[in-house]
Image: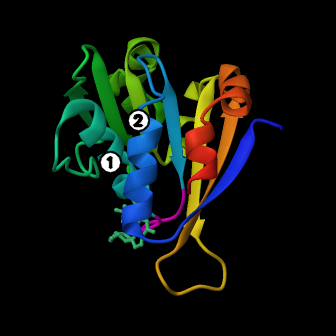
Amino acid sequence: MTGAAEIRLVDESATRDFGLRLAAHLKPGDIVLLEGDLGAGKTTLARAVIEALTGEQDAPSPTYTLVQTYELREGGELWHADLYRVEDEHELEELGLEDAFDFAICLIEWPDRLGAMRPNTYLELDIRPEPGEETGARRVRLTGRGQWEGRLDDGLDDIKTRG
Ligand SMILES: Nc1ncnc2c1ncn2[C@@H]1O[C@H](COP(=O)(O)OP(=O)(O)O)[C@@H](O)[C@H]1O
Ligand SMILES: [Mg+2]
């Protein structure tokens, strides 16, 4: 394997289910970059992770706040960021996201905005509509960088096989 995997998410509940299973593998300091166009399902997926790890059932989209922070059930923090509206790196610095990379579970939508702040180790989830289908089915491509390459190859089997 090559630090990558692909899973079909047949409908919204499959996406949520994927998020719940992924959540079980995440620990403080983990960074998940959520790639995909508007409406791809990034927030839907993040909400499932947030619910599993914090108990928050109705996590708002951080569209305007840029960041929402949560307390993990097991202690520590989860940060959910939507960087769509970020225009320059000073805004990023003010958010304190780079510090959070060290201690929080970070879920980041529109990570292209990170620029030079993009970390070396992360799990990338690229969500897109299943080509040629109008049913709501999505396909998520998982790519591991840095330490996540090995974690993806040697673990997460429950995620990779039960899409
Ligand atoms: N398989 C699917 N996975 C995720 N969302 C889906 C799926 N099928 C339909 N949807 C719908 O697509 C929309 C995704 O919105 P959202 O998660 O806010 O996207 P994003 O954060 O990527 O802009 C929601 O309205 C959701 O109900
Ligand atoms: Mg979103």
Task: Confirm or reject: label 1 Cβ below 8 Å from ligand 1.
Answer: no
Is residue 6 visible from the viewing direction of this image? Answer: yes
Position of the C terminus, as image quadrant, is: bottom right
The first of marks 2 and 1 along the sequence is 2
Query: Relative to residue 6, is residue 107 drawn left or right?
Result: left
Residue type marked 2: Ala
Residue under label 1, please give it. Answer: 48
Q: Which residues are magenta?
A: 36-40
User: Judging from the image, what secondary structure is the residue with disc 1 in?
Assistant: helix
Q: Is residue 37 magenta?
A: yes
Residue type marked 1: Ala
Q: Position of residue 108 (x, y in %)?
A: 44, 39
Above or below — where is 55 with respect to 7? above
Q: At 43% across and 59% down in the image, what residue appears?
A: 15
Q: CA distance from mark 2 to mark 1?
A: 8 Å
Rendering quarter of residue 7: bottom right
Position of the N terminus, as image quadrant, is: top right
User: Judging from the image, what secondary structure is the residue with disc 2 in?
Assistant: helix
Above or below — where is 133 with respect to 79? below
Q: Is residue 138 magenta?
A: no
Residue under label 2, please give it. Answer: 23
Q: Position of residue 3 (x, y in %)?
A: 75, 35
Comparing 3 with 103, the one in front is 3
- By secondary structure, the bulk of the magenta-drawn segment is best described as loop
